Structures are given as structure tokens and as C-alpha cells.
Image: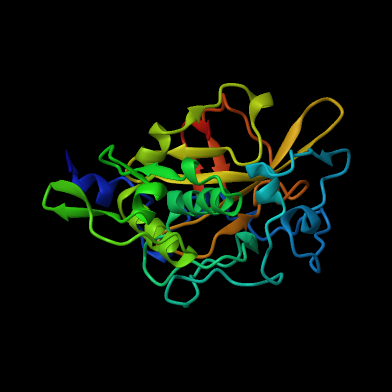
Amino acid sequence: MKKAVLFIFLILFFNCTKAPDSSLDNNDNEGSEVLNTPSVIKINEDKNTIKERFPAPKGYSWTEEQPNSFGYYLENFDLKKYGSPILKYDGSEIETQHLHEAIFDIDTGTKDLQQCADALIRLRAEYLFKNKKFDEIKFHFTSGDLMTWNDYKNGTRAFVNGNSVQFKKTAAFDDSYDNFRKYLDLIFNYAGTISLTKETKLVLKNEQLKTGDFLITPGSPGHIVFITGVSENKRGEKLFLLAEGYTPAQSIHVLKNPFNSEVSPWYRLDVNAAETKTARYFFEASNFRSF
């Protein structure tokens, strides 16, 4: 039996921004004059994966990802029909529908659990599960306690009582996908931006940024966007596609770049920037990280 302190208030206050829809987008005033500017880049609306739908800007080409890598998995992820709205976990539409360019074809669940950090955790875990890398499916709670898929499928469960958590083997072995989704819901409930920051590595150089890396603000309010595509020109300059989940739990979506219609939905990123503006969130400090 393992006992540890689980600070419930950390879970409640150190995940994504807990704002109502009307205030989700903290850049409305500063960027409002360009939010609806059409992109110069033609989007292949009839294509169904990220790499196929979003051609690289003129002078750039998509970087090559290793087959079976996390980056390859993301850039070839299926998308919903072009123009699909962002839906909350309850099936209703969020108010802000003009700042995304695509929707990942993956469920959000039926509870308000799969928020910003959880969206990336979901995709990372799905990638590992699909490639049978079961030993690597493990995530920390905000308290620091580790919950692995191997433990969960063998019957271990977390029991929270006030400020403490106990891990007990109470269920039979079950390695089904349905049980895997139950495991992820547990992770979504007790993990967040702080725990994800602690279990990943800092990216210090622009040339090291790759698909699957992410920009994160841990804390309250906290948020995360992740790289889902990279293009590069002959000078070695890179552009990036960004995606995110949000609060309340909603469709994982690819972001427009409302600040540069010449390259939208691509973004220029700098690990040393004092501020990074994305369509729905401004990051006041650069904290790029990698699994």
C-alpha cells in the first residue's frame, strides 16, 4: 500500500484557465483588428489529416518525422470535416468559433475532464497505446504520485480521502481499450499543467523544437499549446502549427494565427521570446518542453 499527500486544491487551481466561455480568449482587445483576416495560404479543405490539409507556406516544406514517432502520429492525425465547430464535453458549441482551423477526430469524453494539459496527455497516451509502448504510459498526479497504465490494468486504483490518496489493488486484470479510457479519466482528474511540466524536459534552442513539443504556463491560470506540424525553409527557419484543448473540456483543435495572415495557421516561435501570442492565450514567458 502506498500513501501520499494529495493536495486537492492544487488539482482544482493549477490546471487550465477556469474562465467562462465569454472570457476564454484573453487577446480579444489587442488582436481584434486582425482576428477575421483571411489566410493567404490555401487550405486543402477536402483533406483529412493535418499534413495533407495544411500545406507549408511558400518557400517552406514540411519537415520529415520518423515513422512511428509521436510527431509522425500527430501530423498524420485524422481531422473532422472542415468547418466543424468546437464542441464541449456535453455536445454543445462553445461561443468562440472563429479562432480554430481544424478539429481533431477524437472524442472529448462526457465529463468536464479533458481540458488543456489533458488534451496532450490524451494524444500522447493514445500514441503509446497504439504502438504497444505500455511501459511508457505513466503520468504523475499534481501531488507527485505516479499512476501507470500497467498498475491500473492490473487492478490498482487510487482512493482519495480528504488530503490523502491510497493505491490499492481492488479490480481484476483488464487491458481493454475501455479500461484504458477509464485510466485516462483518472489522470485527467488529478494531473495538470504543473505535473506535466515536472515530468518533461525543457527545450532551450529553437532548432530543437519539433512536432509533439509544447508551450506551457503551469499554474493558475495555466495553459498549454502543442506543436502538431513543422515546416522549414532553406535558411533553417521554421514555422509551426499549434493545437490545444481548453476549459471547459472541448474538442482538440488546430489554431488559426490571427496575428499574421501571411502564414496563418502557421506560427513563428522563439524559445527566448518574452511573450508568445496564440489565438486564444498569451504566454508571458517561454516555457517550451518535450517528452
Residue nearest the viewer, comparing 156 with 205: 156
Residue 25 locus on image (x, y percent): 48, 56
Residue nearest the viewer, comparing 137 with 261: 137
Residue 139 locus on image (x, y percent): 39, 43
Residue 239 locus on image (x, y percent): 73, 38
Outermost residue on the left side: it is: 162
- Give the residue at x 79% y 38%: 64
Residue nearest the viewer, comparing 229 with 35: 229
Quadrant of residue 110 within the rendered picture: bottom left
Residue 17 locus on image (x, y percent): 37, 52
Residue nearest the viewer, comparing 183 with 104: 183
* Colour treatment of the image: rainbow
Looking at the image, residue 86 sits to the left or right of residue 264; the answer is left
Quadrant of image for the N terminus: top left
- Give the residue at x 81% y 53%: 40
Quadrant of residue 112 within the rendered picture: bottom left
Outermost residue on the front side: it is: 173
Q: Is residue 203 above or below residue 111?
A: above
Q: Is residue 255 above or below residue 210?
A: below
- Give the residue at x 40% y 48%: 150
* Count of numbered marks: 0
- Give the residue at x 52% y 68%: 107
Q: Is residue 49 above or below residue 136?
A: below
